[in-house]
Image: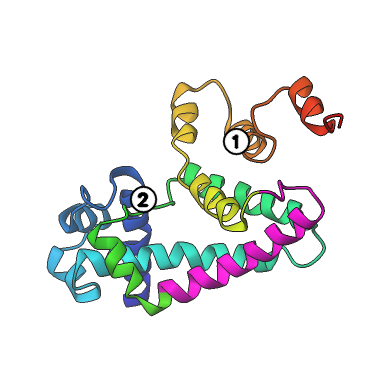
């Protein structure tokens, strides 16, 4: 029962973090959403920082599991696209917490949390291997530092374009995901621009 309640608390916290962000979300909000007394919530998580950290660790753990589930049959580029789709779907489901601001209390708490760092390193290393492999085949721009590509992919997990498209109601979830994957990996340039960029300049 305690584990079930803790799971419900973390699901609620993830959703509220996605909707409101860390600064706006309160422990009262979480307790009310789960349907428990605030005193009971504090028995599981003694602070909002710890609750938010555990919620974000939960999402990172799911991301690591999703990457592992892809196996070794996909190409590096397809693996990166699959993980981007996964992150966008999680965001569409309202389960992706917003990334903490650089100088936020939450970021400080996360950087001091061993579980968060371990999951982040594990996921970053897996994605980093795919990025390096894709760049070696020129499937991704080899001129970009790998960390730029990595941070760009992490940013897609909180892409503000997604909720705007969702709210407009002109596209279904599957179409939104594929359009954002396309803009991430194919860019916005038209075919003529892409072909011109591929033709080496005469010397």
Image: magenta residue range: 116-143
Whole-number angstrom distance, CA of label 1 to CA of label 2: 21 Å
Instruction: In the displayed orientation, state which residue is furthest to the bottom.
Output: 114
Decide if residue 1 is in sight here. Answer: no
Residue beneath the point at 48% across and 64% down: 60
Q: Is residue 193 magenta?
A: no
Residue beneath the point at 19% across and 69% down: 47
In the picture, measured across the screen, residue 38 lies left or right of residue 89, that is left
Q: Which mark is residue 158?
A: none
Location of residue 106 (image quadrant): bottom left
| Position of residue 193 measured from the top left corner of the image (x, y, whole percent) | 74, 23
| Position of residue 142 measured from the top left corner of the image (x, y, whole percent) | 72, 51
Residue pointed to by mark 1 = 180
Examine the residues drawn in magenta and state their main secondary structure: helix
Depicted 59 relative to depicted 143: above or below: below
- Circle 2 SS class: helix
Circle 1 Cα neighbour tier, 10 Å, few/some/many (<14 / 14–19 / ≥20): some
In the picture, measured across the screen, residue 82 lies left or right of residue 91, that is right
Q: Which mark is residue 15?
A: 2
């Amino acid at each position: 029962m305690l584990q079930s309640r803790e799971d419900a608390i973390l699901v609620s916290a993830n959703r509220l973090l996605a909707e409101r962000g860390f600064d706006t979300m309160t422990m009262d909000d979480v307790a009310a959403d789960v349907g428990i007394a605030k005193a009971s919530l504090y028995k599981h998580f003694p602070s909002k920082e710890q609750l938010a950290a555990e919620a974000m660790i939960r999402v990172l753990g799911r991301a690591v599991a999703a990457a592992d589930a892809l196996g070794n049959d996909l190409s590096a580029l397809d693996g990166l696209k699959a993980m981007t789709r996964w992150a966008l779907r999680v965001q569409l489901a309202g389960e992706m917490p917003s990334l903490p601001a650089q100088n936020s209390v939450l970021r400080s708490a996360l950087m001091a949390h061993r579980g968060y760092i371990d999951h982040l390193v594990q996921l970053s290393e897996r994605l980093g291997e795919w990025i390096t492999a894709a760049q070696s085949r020129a499937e991704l721009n080899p001129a970009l530092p790998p960390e730029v590509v990595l941070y760009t992919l992490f940013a897609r997990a909180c892409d503000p374009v997604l909720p705007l498209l969702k709210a407009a109601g002109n596209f279904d979830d599957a179409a939104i995901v594929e359009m954002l994957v396309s803009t991430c990996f194919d860019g916005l340039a038209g075919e003529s621009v892409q072909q011109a960029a591929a033709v080496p300049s005469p010397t």
